[in-house]
Image: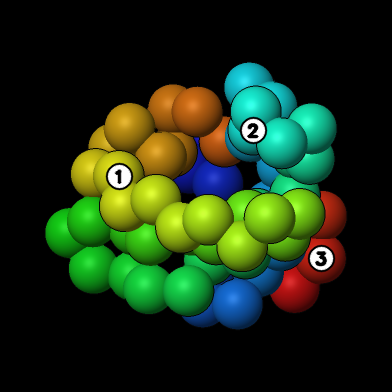
Amino acid sequence: MEKEFELNDIVEMKKQHPCGTNRWKIIRMGADIRIKCEGCGHSVMIPRREFARKLKKILSE
């Protein structure tokens, strides 16, 4: 089943960020998805397919 995620959702990924936080905010969507760490503010852009595979759960919408 495809997980439904939208812009500005707070998500939890399978792996924790090195800063110790596991909360990410989706800040850009397209073929690639940019997510921003809620702890340190670092942003990462990853392909949509890889993002869907690494997504653990959606925390808030």
Q: For residue 15, which quarter of the picture?
A: top right
Q: Is residue 17 visible?
A: yes
Residue 14, position as x, y percentages in the image: 64, 24
Q: Could you say which is closer to the camera, residue 20 or residue 14?
A: 20
Q: Amino acid at mark 1?
A: Ile
Q: Relative to residue 42, is residue 19 depicted above or below?
A: above
For marks 1 and 2 on the same chain, the one whose residue lies earlier in the sequence = 2
> Which residue shows up at 23% across the image and 68% down it?
30
> Which residue shows up at 33% across the image and 32% down it?
50
- Residue on which disc 2 sits: 17
- Secondary structure at numbered mark 3: strand
In this picture, residue 49 sits left or right of residue 52: left
Q: Is residue 56 visible?
A: no
In this picture, residue 56 sits left or right of residue 2: right
Q: Amino acid at mark 3?
A: Ser
- Residue on which disc 3 sits: 60
Residues marked 2 and 3 touching at CB (< 8 Å): no
In this picture, residue 19 sits left or right of residue 60: left
> Which residue shows up at 34% across the image and 70% down it?
29
Q: Amino acid at mark 2?
A: His
Q: Could you say which is closer to the camera, residue 37 or residue 52?
A: 37
Residue 10, position as x, y percentages in the image: 71, 62
